[in-house]
Image: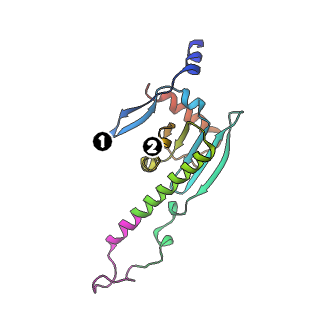
Amino acid sequence: MFVRTVFLHFAIPRIGKTPGIGGKTARHTTCGWLSMNTKFFIITNRGHLLALRRTETNSLELLDETFIKEGNAKLSELVTDQAGAFGNSGTPGTTATERMPLEAELEVQCFRKIAAKISDLLKEHNPGWWGLAAPSEINGAIVDHLDAKVREKISVNLKLDLTNSPRSGLLKRFEKAAHESPR
């Protein structure tokens, strides 16, 4: 037990890549040291972002809470056009296929807003290493929209929606993920 404690205090953090599904790579940490020394956490989903800091008493303090309008709103709440309002070359109304590019563009804008907010928070608080939790279906898109320097400082990346989870269990989730990651 003593040797493990000494190792964790003097471990040199290394971030590597592991082959993932479809030839993509998944980030991992080589030791749990990163999570234990991580003091800043971003928990997000499409419409809600929480920035938390680990306190001296090992609890989490809420630093910022942001609601992203585009994240959970219906398309009809975001745009005022109605189908049929603008004709196409004499045809009565617009086609349903025009709706998909708009929905996709709104989703990309949402990811950009989340990434920009994360970058602003990290610039303001300058935490060094930080942890991210975002649902698996949007996690990669958010990470892709982050600057490379910000991305490199992710110590633990959970592909879970923890925005409604009690704060008391969040630290344990991040630490458990760091210890379970490939070494």
What numbered label is drawn on residue 182?
Answer: none
- Tag 1, which secondary structure? helix
| Mark nearer the N terminus (1 vs 2) | 1
Residue pointed to by mark 1: 22
Please name the amino acid that badge 2 sits on.
Ala
**Residue 41 visible at all:** yes
Q: Is residue 127 above or below residue 64?
A: above
Q: Is residue 157 above or below residue 13?
A: below
Q: Residues within 10 Å of mark 1 (few under 14, many from 20)?
A: few
Question: Where is residue 157 drawn, in percent x and y?
Answer: 49, 39
Q: Toward the viewer: 35 or 123?
A: 123
Q: Residue furthest bottom?
A: 90
Residue at 52 percent across and 47 percent down: it is 161
| SS majority, magenta | loop
Q: Residues within 10 Å of mark 2 (few under 14, many from 20)?
A: few
Q: Is residue 4 above or below residue 22?
A: above
Camera-nearest label, 1 or 2: 2
Question: Where is residue 123 drawn, in percent x and y?
Answer: 58, 46
Question: Where is residue 17 drawn, in percent x and y?
Answer: 39, 33
What numbered label is drawn on residue 148?
Answer: 2
Residue range highlighted in magenta: 83-103
Please name the amino acid that badge 1 sits on.
Gly
Residue at 30 percent across and 39 percent down: it is 23
Q: Toward the viewer: 148 or 15?
A: 148
Residue at 50 percent across and 47 percent down: it is 134
> Which image quadrant is residue 26 in?
top left
> Is residue 55 within the magenta segment?
no
What's the colour scheme?
Answer: rainbow
